Image (spheres, rainbow, N blue to C red):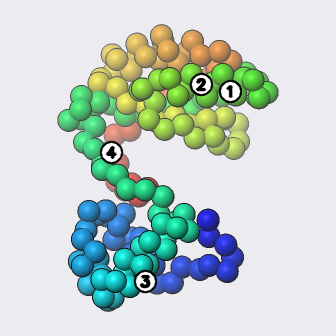
Amino acid sequence: MISSKSTLDPIDRKLISILQADARVSNVDLAAQVGLSPTPCSRRVKRLEDLGVITGYGARVNQAALGNGISVLIAVRLLESPLPVLDAFIEAVKASPEITKCQLVTGELDYILTVRTTDVDALREWVLTELKRIPHVAETSTMLILDTVKSVE
């Protein structure tokens, strides 16, 4: 991980930005875009990987093309939160392929889930048969995602 002594300079930040937009960019093109020659560029990218700034590479997938046309955020509040309850909830989340992201949050809620299903009927069925049956779930609130204007991860 980055220590307080290891800071990112403007070239590092530009490398990260370019790789976030297109992780398949060639090292030659990447180097040209940041004003470096290929060898120092690849060294910088390797350094960012070694520092844990760049944690991996992946493909952005059109979920609708996979049949997952509905994406929702579901806020979850648990009845209680001792460790065994949290562990049981997390295991149930990990076992559900519909849940694509689970984030622990502060405030009145406990978790925010990102869920993908084929359509509203499938979402309704999943909520009633899967989510509501997870032990210790006290309350949920579902928000349909209409559009994603920006997504940088």
98 shown above or below 32 = above
Q: Which residue is mark 2?
A: 91
Picture residue at 65% right of the left edge, 15% below the top: 135
How far apart, in angstroms, are the residues tagged by discs 3 and 4?
32 Å
Q: Crowdedness of circle 4 by 10 Å Cα count: few (<14), some, many (20+)?
A: few
Q: Are marks 1 and 3 in contact (CB under 8 Å)?
A: no
Question: At 33% across and 88% down in the image, what residue appears?
Answer: 36
Q: Which residue is mark 3?
A: 11
| Quadrant holding the C terminus | bottom left
Secondary element under disc 3, as helix, strand or loop, is helix
Task: Please report contact status of discs 3 and 4: CB closer than 8 Å, yes or no.
Answer: no
What residue would you read off at disc 4? 147
Q: Residues within 10 Å of mark 3 (few under 14, many from 20)?
A: some
Question: Of the residues shown, which amino acid type is indicated by label 4?
Answer: Asp
Q: Are marks 1 and 2 in contact (CB under 8 Å)?
A: yes
Cα gap from disc 1 to disc 3, whole angstroms:
42 Å
Label 1 or label 4, whichever comes before in sequence order? 1
* Of labels 1 and 4, the one closer to you: 1
